[in-house]
Image (cartoon, rainbow, N blue to C red):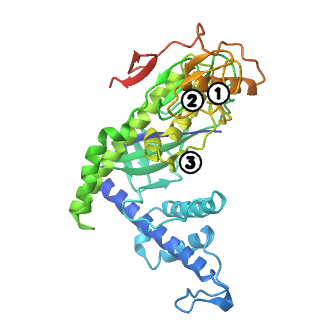
Amino acid sequence: MLTLTYEYKAAPTDEQIQLIEHTLTVCRKVWNFALRERKDWLNSRRCQVNACSIISEYIIPADAAYPNYYEQAKSLTLAKTEHPELKTVNAQVLQQVLRKLETAFVDMQRKGMGFPRFKNRYRMRSFVYPQLGKGEILKGNQIKLPQLGWMEYVRSRDIPDGFKVKQARIVRKASGYFLMLTLECDVNVPDPVASGHPRGIDLGLDKFAATSDGELIERPRFLDTLHRKLKLLQRRLKNKQKGSNNRHKLNRKIARLHQRIADTRKDWHFKLAHQLCDEAGMIFVEDIDFRTWAKGMLGKHTLDAGFGQFVSILQWVCWKRGIYFAKVDKDYTSQVCPQCDTHTGKKDLSDRLHACHNCGYTTHRDVAAAQVIRNRGINALGRSVEENACGDGLTGTGNRLVKGQRSRKKGGEVRLQSTS
C-alpha cells in the first residue's frame, strides 16, 4: 500500500471560512476539556494515600477509570445532549481530536516527548475528515467535504492514476487555508537498488554541503535576510495589549514573515536535493541527530539551515527518483584520509584543509569528509572502492542544475541560486 499526501491552496467562500473557523473553535474546546480531564485524573493519583498535600488535592473517586480515548469518545456522545454546539461539527472530526490527544500521550511515554499543552486560537490550526463519503468527491478544481460542501482549490498538480482520496485535512496558515489530501494506491514499490555513481554528502555550517565529487555549496542565510524586519515587528508586539485587535493583526504579520522564511527554505532544499540526485545512483549521508546541534552554541544557525528537514527531503527525492539512499557512521569522518584510510588526527574548526602526511593527498576538509562518507557507504554494501578519492574524470562530477536554477563557480565553490 502506497500512501501520498498532496497539498493544495484552498479557496473557500466567506460562508465556508466561517464554518472552518467555527470547527476549529469547537475542536479547540474539545481538546482543552479532554486534556484537563486527563490532567486532573493524573494529579489525583500523584500522591500516596497517607501522604496527601495539606494545601490542595484533586479529589476523584478511586474507582474512576482512566479517561482514555474510548472513555472520552463515549462521554463526547453523551455531552451532545447538554451542549448543542457539539452537534454543529462533524462527529468524526471531533473523534479525530481525541485520537490526536491519545497519540500525544503515547508519544510522551514511548518517545520521551513533552506533556501535551492547552491550545489557544493560534495553536489549533487544522482538523481532518477521516472519511469523505461515497459518490463523486472531486470535480475539476472542486472537492466535496462534509458540511462545507463543494470547495474550490488551486489544482497545482493532478492526482496520479490509480490513487484514491482517503481523507482530507484543512490547515490554516498565515497565508490562507490549505487542503491536504491523503492518497492511497494498492501497489507495492520496491526499494531502489544500489547501483550507479556513488556520492557522499557532508553537511556543515561553513558550507551547507560538500560532495565527494568536489562540489561546495554555500549555506544561505534564510533567517538573517529577514531578521532585521522580524526583530522590528517583535519589538512592536511587546507594547501591544494582550487580546487586542492590533496585537492580533501584528501576530498575523509576524506569522506571514515566518512562513515566508520557512517556504523559501523548503523550496531551496527540494531544488538542492534534485540537483544532488542528478547523475548519481547512490547517495550516502551521515547518521546525525541534528537536535543535538540545535542545543549548542550554534543552535540558531543550525535551525536556520534546517539540516534535519533537508535529509528527510533528500531521502524522499532519492526514493522518488529510484536512487539508493543510506546513512553511515558519523564518527571521525574529518579525521580519516579518504585516499589511504589513515587517521590524520583531530582538526580545529578553523582548519579547512585536509593534508595527509602519509600519502600527501590534499583537498578541502569537507570534501575529504564527504569522500570518507562515500567510502563507508560503499564498504557497507560489500563492495570495494574503485574510484579515485578526488573524483577526477568520473561520471557525475559535473554540475547539472535543475530547472529554475543557475550556479556561480568561484574558487571551486558551487553556489546555488534561484532564478524565480
* Name of the residue lying farthest toward the top: 393
Q: Where's residue 375, x and y in %?
A: 69, 23
| SS for callout 1 | helix
Looking at the image, residue 192 lies above or below residue 175 = above
- Along the viewing direction, whichever of 64 and 356 lies nearer the viewer: 356
In the picture, which quadrant includes the C terminus? Answer: top left
Between 323 and 143, the one nearer to me in the picture: 323
Tag shown at residue 373? 1
First reached walking from the N terminus: tag 1 or tag 2? 2
Q: Is residue 375 above or below residue 78?
A: above
In what element is the residue under mark 3?
Answer: helix
Residue denoted by label 2: 202
Q: Examine the image and state in which quarter residue 237 appears.
A: bottom left
Measure the C-alpha gap from mark 1 to mark 2. Answer: 7 Å
Identify the residue under disc 3: 292
- The residue sitting at 54% across, 32% down in the picture is 203
Examine the image and state in which quarter residue 347 appears: top right
- SS class, disc 2: strand
- Amino acid at circle 2: Asp
Q: Residues within 10 Å of mark 2 (few under 14, many from 20)?
A: many
Disc sitting over residue 41 in the figure: none
- Tell me whether the residue at label 1 lies in contact with that at label 2, contact meaning CB atoms closer than 8 angstroms: yes
Kind of residue at badge 3: Thr
